[in-house]
Every structure is written in structure tokens, then in C-alpha cells.
Image (cartoon, rainbow, N blue to C red):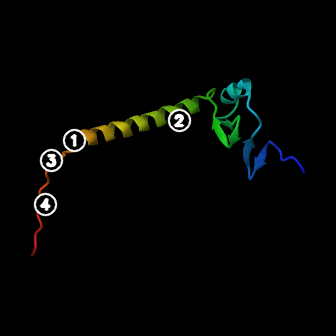
């Protein structure tokens, strides 16, 4: 039986299923001189390159959106009334 390749590209998307080492994991997320997206050290697709300033901007925006969403959910839960509600139906 022929062994399948552990890494490569499929339809332009990289994959790598080789057993990751600590060094490879750390170096995959910090690649100065490369673009914002780099190949994942394990799995399918791309990940953020933390050596690129644009990646930090993406993380900042994602964190702000998450904070805003959770703040809004907390305010909605705090303002919700559990008391009785009067419903008026107008039959004309």
C-alpha cells in the first residue's frame, strides 16, 4: 500500500499532518518578513503571523467586537424584567 503524503496542497489550501514539534509550533506563528497569513504548523489552512503588525490589528478588532457583544448581552440580561407583561389586543 502506498503511503499518503503528510503535507502538501489541495486546491491551493496547504495541509500538514506531520507530528508537530515545539520548535515548529513556535516558529510557525512568528515569521518576520512573511505576510499576515502563514501555513498552519498542524492541520489544514492558514493562521496569523504574529510578527506582522496587521495580525495584531485583526486580533484587536476581534477582541473589541467580542467585548462589545458580551457587554451588550450583559446589559440586555440586566435590563430584562421578569415581572408580568400586559398584552392589549384591539379587535376592530
| Mark sitting on residue 58 | 2
Residue 73, given in percent of the width and then of the height, sits at 33, 41
Sequence order check, earlier mark of 2 and 3: 2
Q: Are marks 1 and 2 in contact (CB under 8 Å)?
A: no
Observer-side mark, 2 or 4, equals 4
Badge 3 element: loop
Badge 4 element: loop
In the displayed structure, 14 sits above or below 55; it is: below
User: Residue shown at 30%/38% (left/top)?
Assistant: 74
Badge 2 element: helix
Residue 47, given in percent of the width and then of the height, sits at 64, 37
Q: Are marks 2 and 3 in contact (CB under 8 Å)?
A: no
Dot 4 corresponds to which residue?
87
Badge 1 element: helix
Alpha carbons under labels 3 and 4: distance apart: 13 Å
Dot 1 corresponds to which residue?
79
Residue 55 lies in quadrant: top right
Dot 3 corresponds to which residue?
83
User: Residue shown at 19%/46% (left/top)?
Assistant: 82
Alpha carbons under labels 1 and 2: distance apart: 32 Å
Amino acid at each position: 500500500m502506498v503511503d499518503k503524503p503528510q503535507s502538501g496542497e489541495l486546491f491551493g489550501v496547504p495541509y500538514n499532518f506531520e507530528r508537530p514539534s515545539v520548535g515548529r509550533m513556535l516558529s510557525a506563528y512568528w515569521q518576520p518578513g512573511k505576510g499576515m497569513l502563514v501555513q498552519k504548523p498542524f492541520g489544514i489552512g492558514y493562521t496569523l503571523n504574529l510578527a506582522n503588525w496587521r495580525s495584531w490589528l485583526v486580533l484587536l478588532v476581534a477582541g473589541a467586537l467580542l467585548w462589545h457583544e458580551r457587554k451588550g448581552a450583559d446589559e440586555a440580561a440586566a435590563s430584562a424584567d421578569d415581572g408580568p407583561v400586559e398584552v392589549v389586543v384591539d379587535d376592530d
